[in-house]
Image: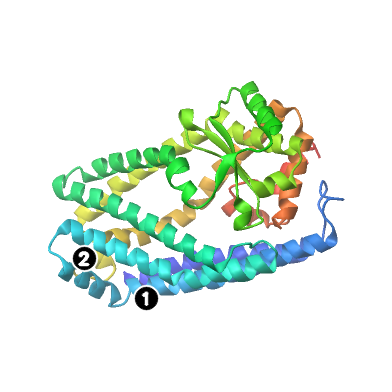
Amino acid sequence: MKTVLIAAYLARFAAGYLLRFLNLRHLGRHGTAIPEGFVGAIDAEALAKSASYTMEQSRVALVHSVYDSAWLLLFLFTPLLPRYDAWIRSLSGSFVVQGILFLVVLTLAQDLLEIPFSLHSTFRTEKKYGFNTMTTRLWVTDFLKSTAISLLFLVILSAAAFLLVQHAPQLWWLWVWCFFALFSITMIYLSPYVIEPLFSKFEPLQDEELAREIRGLLAKGGVEVKAVMQMDASRRSTHSNAYFTGIGKVKRIVLFDTLLKQMDRSELLAILAHEAGHWKKGHIWKRLVVTEGAALAALFLVAELVAWGGVPAMFGLTDASFACQMVLISFLASIVLFALTPVGSFYSRKHEWEADRYATELSGNPEALASALVKLSKENLANLHPHPFYAFFYYSHPPVVERVAKLLHR
């Protein structure tokens, strides 16, 4: 069975490699053509730089994928896993403490193994193409903060989960789901005020006239926000973005300072009208419901697999702790979920089309949204020529050329 699992994982890896190969070959063949709707905004030099950026990112991603896969297979299909499991069990006789230690040590090791690629991405690739503005000191600070926060959350969640497993062995999956769902919703409320300010500086939008226009536009669409903020994104990167954060009465808009420099008023309003569309069309709560429903089904299935007791044997193990079985089941899930990737991508693109239509209706200015998308593509060196099947499989947003064409009715 171990051979079958390794073969299935390698098949998944090969499929991902094939998709990446098709995408790069397609870009090589068509990457010099300036799409309709982009003429005059992007020249041959900018297009060549965009293609080069995409290719370099893909090459690094391939090496990264090989690196991660090698470590994963080495850990799961050699004596490393049972020895690690036995070592963790020797540290404590407590089921809960064993579970926490198993996940925390493993997560910390994974974070450390990822450092070379994070450094390469930030200080080589992003710097080479003019995006990185982060200092080494800031990178280290961010890494330490994010690692500390993620480990803190992991301890809280795993402690609660293992306690529930211990005290409710028949229905633990239901109680764990309830706790995780409550924690997730709580963090949606708290994150804008507790977590996000640890990494970035947020302040009210300095352009008060623009803030009034934004509120007026959103009020026209029936969307109420608590605050319109700007964020010092330029401390880390020249990439630009805007987003809604929070839910209910704590919703607020955050604009990257880089976006404020790149867009004119009409383009900013069009972008925010698009984001408002996600709220008005119910995309936020729909995604939340689907996510939580899938999590509930997944936890039930995990409970059934654990009760079955055959998971360790699939990996050639005679015994495995509960935490160890969670890791093994996660590996199995990664193979299955890869095949389901296009389903999630399809529904995400569907929501983006709906938000584009809403933005057009709300602002009455589809040309402004098209212009904003063209600028974002140029500034972020987006790939304007993705392979159709690659986009179908992976893209959460419709290809930008198609969006611009539809907005301009071409």
Question: Relative to residue 224, is residue 97 drawn left or right?
Answer: left
| Residue drawn where x is 69% and y is 36% of the image | 207
* Tag 1: amino acid: Leu
Q: Position of residue 15 (x, y in %)?
A: 53, 64
Element class at badge 2 = loop
Residue 46 in view here: yes
* Tag 2: amino acid: Ala
| Residue drawn where x is 67% and y is 38% of the image | 271
Q: Which label's residue is closer to the chain start, 2 or 1?
A: 1
Question: Relative to residue 148, is residue 341 drawn left or right?
Answer: right
Residue matched to label 2:
320
Which of the image's four quarters has the C terminus?
Answer: top right
- Residue 74, labelled with which disc? 1
| Residue drawn where x is 38% and y is 59% of the image | 148
Q: Nearer the viewer, residue 212 or 40?
A: 212
**Label 2, label 1: how many angstroms apart (C-alpha)?**
17 Å
Q: Position of residue 179 (x, y in %)?
A: 29, 41
Q: Nearer the viewer, residue 242 or 296?
A: 242
Q: Position of residue 77 (x, y in %)?
A: 33, 74
Which of the image's four quarters has the N terminus?
Answer: bottom left
Element class at badge 1 = helix
- Residue 24, labelled with which disc? none
